[in-house]
Image: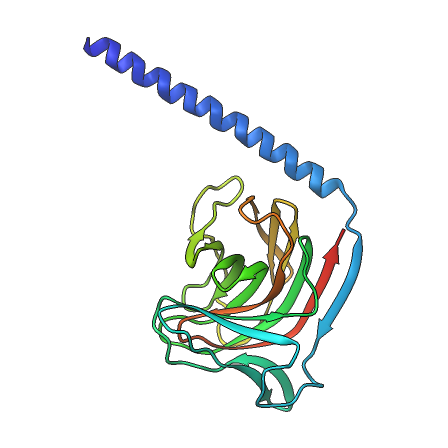
Amino acid sequence: MKTLSILSLVLVLTACQNTNREQDKKTAAYIAKIQQQIPQVTTEKSFDFENYESGKLPADWSQYATGRDQHTEWQITNDQGNKVMAQLSNKHPNYHFNVAVYNGLSAKNVDLSLRFKAINGQMDQGGGFVWRFKDADNYYVVRANPLEDNVVLYKVVNGKRSDLPLVGKGRTYGIDVPKLGNRWNNLRLVAKDRLFTVYLNGKKLFDVVDDTFTGKGKTGLWTKADAVTYFDDYKIKVLK
């Protein structure tokens, strides 16, 4: 009986390994197919925030909060003579997300880029993008955190945030990156159907494949907890 039990376990493990290999092949083929397509930009929108009034949230943007506190404070502020979009509130509890989205377009496939600078934060720092934003509790987000020096891509479903596995690496809680510090860094995301590709400071970091949110949604900016962060040169390219 013991021999049969061990044999059964081996057969189950072997079947699981074969299934995983087959799934990896399908994922690789899907990514190759998407990457062979030439990106076609249908709409572009850029924000340097210079034409917005300081001390206010731009009229064509909306702010949201998810978690234990519903307060958030997005506004245009001055950074050494340069206007930026900033999340300034530093009093939030740990499980709290600050979101600001642009209301002027809704899209499924996008190429997003921005510069961000972490100003301060004890529980969290930095920030990133949201896309396919349906409401304050449902969207994708990728963020860079100078306290942890990593970049992680999540889905937020019904207010619950979950990190997503990286292609070829599994669920690693994102990827570690060189020290971000409190300087300007560049973050980029390309979302094409189920494939999401993330870049930091011009270098590709990882791919994620997921189909939780497959429709159009708004795009915007994101921080967590008490992170005070400046954002600039936000660019949206809508892809066909």
Query: In which quadrant of the rendered view does residue 128 lie?
Result: bottom right
Residue at position x 33%, y 17% from top?
A: 10
Residue 20 is situated, as x and y percent measured from the top left of the image, at: 48, 28
Q: Please give the count of numbered marks on the rendered protein.
A: 0
**From where the camera sits, is residue 187 visible?**
no
Residue at position x 26%, y 15% from top?
A: 6
Residue 138 falls left or right of residue 6: right
Residue 3 is situated, as x and y percent measured from the top left of the image, at: 23, 9
Residue 222 is situated, as x and y percent measured from the top left of the image, at: 52, 68
Q: Nearer the viewer, residue 16 or 75?
A: 75
Query: In which quadrant of the rendered view does residue 125 lie?
Result: bottom left
Q: Indicate whether 163 appears above or below 185.
A: above
Q: Indicate whether 8 appears above or below 21.
A: above
Residue at position x 65%, y 70% from top?
A: 103
Q: Nearer the viewer, residue 97 or 84?
A: 97
The residue lying furthest to the left in this view is: 1
Q: Nearer the viewer, residue 113 or 210?
A: 210
Residue 207 is situated, as x and y percent measured from the top left of the image, at: 58, 47
Residue at position x 53%, y 59% from top?
A: 142
**From where the camera sits, is residue 108 visible?**
yes
